[in-house]
Amino acid sequence: MKRLVSLGLVLGCTLMSAGQDSLPERNLEAITLSVNKWQQSRNEVPNKITRVVPQQIYHYNPQTAADMLAQTGTVFVQKSQLGGGSPMIRGFATNRVLLVVDGVRMNNAIYRSGNLQNVISIDPLTVENTEVIFGPGSLIYGSDAIGGVMAFRTLQPQFAHDSKLLVKASAFARYATANNERTAHADVAVGTRKLSFLAAYTRSDFDDLRMGKNGRDENYIRPEYVERINGQDVITQNSNPNVQRFSGYTQDNFLGKIRYKPNDAVELQYAFTYAGTGNAPRYDRLIQYRNGALRFAEWTYGPMLWRMHTLNALLTQKSALADNISIVASYQNYEESRIDRARNNNTRTRQAEEVDAYSLNIDATKRLGQGQVFYGFETVDNKVGSFGTQTNIANGSTVSFATRYPNGSTWSTTGVYANYRHNLSAVTTLNGGLRYSYNTLNAT
């Protein structure tokens, strides 16, 4: 049993200059939702923030959430295969940057230091707002956010106001020639004055990626590939070396939400999120050579599945302790695996992981004179299942193999934080805060 206790103190100061010039007036994005988990002016936030809104998504048409982040020009995304993307913020990646969806952390116990592909589980067509926070976000979010935070807010069911019933629906289809992408999306929302519902579904099919013939990197062309013919691995010449054979994959995304507002001071919401990919071949391994010949016959990430149930409560009745309170309880289930087989070897190795992640977040805000206090509590508990097998593809026999992580291991973290913001003047804001975290790991 390993225990780690951390204590952090963060101070920041934001300065805003104001003046008159001859430039025309512009409408600026002045609201941020993620730095303190509550709406506030960007002028009061010391961190650099990049936002992505639906208009940008429909303009640039990213195929995945990884592409969406890369198109900001401020997040570097590492890709080893078409079905992937590992975001990096100022040199920090994987378990040093935090992915947050609707206030729930995606990071779990198997987020390692190597590149991770989980961000593609987020459907960009159901993202209402994305905020990339540069610099430490550990005060509010914990140590996973030491390099930055990528916070995604998905579509929200809307209540009817002037009418008794509000109905909205939209559909979207896209075709791209580079990888023969076929994507279809549909969503529908129905709302009354107190109850609303939303459902959205996206299906994407990607064939093998075709690279351009001009300015290409010769290290990534595909002059040949391995096929299994009559029980033998055969090297076949590629009719078009620009086509990255065995790079395509499929993906399904679903989002469902129910929102209930019994009165002006209470709002409840349940959400279910599902994301699932098919096998996603790892292209950089499939083009590796050893002794002058292709090394692998197979190297694939197995289906990556993500299911999330979330229950939210927002309380806006002012009291002596808080003006607003947000409670978010969540359960997530992750499944992922990797499958590889060397050329001219009948042994296929498969290592699979499953993570059950439970979390509870309670966040509150209270205005004190010219200042405002943000404080909260978080607890996270993860249980990891890890399995390994080797299968002889010639006779079908299977034996156990080493797992990537200790099977049955658990990891948990509990933290409390408080952050104070004070506007010293119209152009100067002081931020200071403190966080206490307690972490436990049981892995043998």
Image (cartoon, helix red, strand yellow):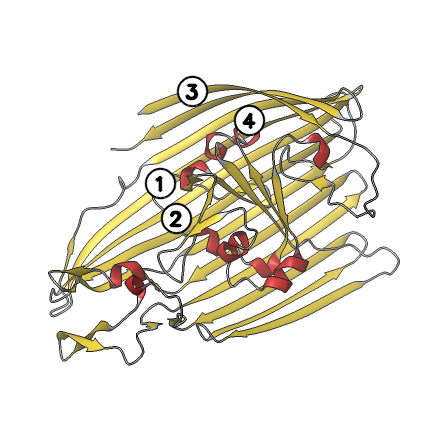
What number is the disc on residue 116?
2
Cα distance between the residues tagged 1 and 3: 20 Å
**In front: label 1 or label 3:** 1
Q: Which mark is residue 5?
A: 3
Residue 42 place in picture, x, y as percent: 70, 36
Image disc number at residue 22: none
Q: CA distance from mark 1 to mark 4?
A: 21 Å
* Vertical comparison of 323 with 27: above or below: above
Q: Which residue shows up at 51% across the image and 63% down it?
A: 63
Q: Which residue is mark 4?
A: 139
The reply to whether dot 2 and dot 3 touch (C-beta < 8 Å) is no
Give the mark nearer the N terminus: 4 vs 2: 2
Q: Residue at x 12, y 65 (%)?
A: 346
Q: Amino acid at mark 4?
A: Leu
Q: Are marks 2 and 1 in contact (CB under 8 Å)?
A: yes
Residue wearing tag 1:
112
SS at badge 3 = strand
Of label 1 and label 4, which has the lower sequence position? Answer: 1
Q: Residues within 10 Å of mark 4 (few under 14, many from 20)?
A: many
For badge 3, the amino acid type reads Val
Q: Earlier in the sequence, mark 2 or mark 3?
A: 3
Viewer-side residue, 141 vs 80: 80
Q: Secondary structure at mark 1?
A: loop
Relative height, residue 238 to residue 87 (above, below): below
